[in-house]
Image (cartoon, rainbow, N blue to C red):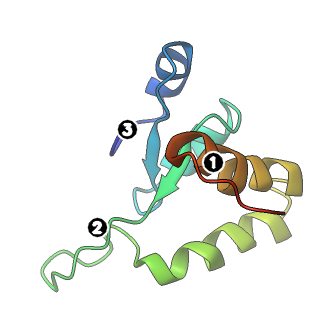
Amino acid sequence: MHHAEPVTIDMASNDGIMPSIPMGRRGEFEEAVKHGPRFVVESDFIDDPKRPGAVIPPWTLIRKLRSYLINGFINEEFLHTLCVDNINKVYGVYVLS
């Protein structure tokens, strides 16, 4: 579910749909975390100088997630579920961890 809002996490996960929460929208990741790691994150980079900050560049996703981990907002288990287990479910690929 591309560009989902946090409110859809509970509804979507009951139907087997994995919401994708944009990291660039202010406060949406923080709200999504309250629902548990039943979503994936996206950057969906827009190269438009007229819309700075609309979304974050893909290469900054890891820095953003690392800062949430370091600051204790999420833990390693949450991050692993978000970035490995959920990706495996969505794409049917299995990453060794």
Q: Amino acid at mark 2?
A: Ala
Q: Position of residue 88 (x, y in %)?
A: 63, 48
User: Helix or strand or loop: what does disc 3 sit on?
Assistant: loop
Tell me the quarter of the picture where residue 92 sits: top right
Tell which tag, 2 or 1, sits nearer the viewer: 1
Q: Which residue is disc 3 drawn over?
A: 4
User: Helix or strand or loop: what does disc 2 sit on?
Assistant: loop
Compared across the picture, whether 87 is left or right of 74 comes to left
- Image quadrant in which the N terminus is located: top left
69 or 87: which is nearer to us?
87
Q: Position of residue 53 (x, y in %)?
A: 33, 73
State if disc 1 and disc 3 touch (CB < 8 Å): no
User: Is residue 27 in view from this perspective?
Assistant: no
User: Is residue 62 in view from this perspective?
Assistant: yes
Q: Is residue 15 above or below residue 25?
A: above
Decide: few, some or many residues near mark 3? Use Cα within 10 Å; few <14, some 14-19, many ≥20: some
Q: Which residue is disc 2 drawn over?
A: 54
Q: Amino acid at mark 1?
A: Asn
Compared across the picture, whether 62 is left or right of 73 comes to left
Q: Amino acid at mark 3?
A: Ala
Tell which tag, 3 or 2, sits nearer the viewer: 3
The first of marks 3 and 1 along the sequence is 3
Task: Give the alpha-carbon distance from disc 3 to disc 2, as whole Å.
Answer: 15 Å
User: Helix or strand or loop: what does disc 1 sit on?
Assistant: helix
Q: Which residue is disc 1 drawn over?
A: 88
**Residue visible at 49% across and 46% down?**
28
**Residue visible at 37% across and 38% down?**
4
Compared across the picture, whether 26 is left or right of 96 comes to left
**Residue visible at 44% across and 56% down?**
26
**Residue visible at 46% across and 36% down?**
19
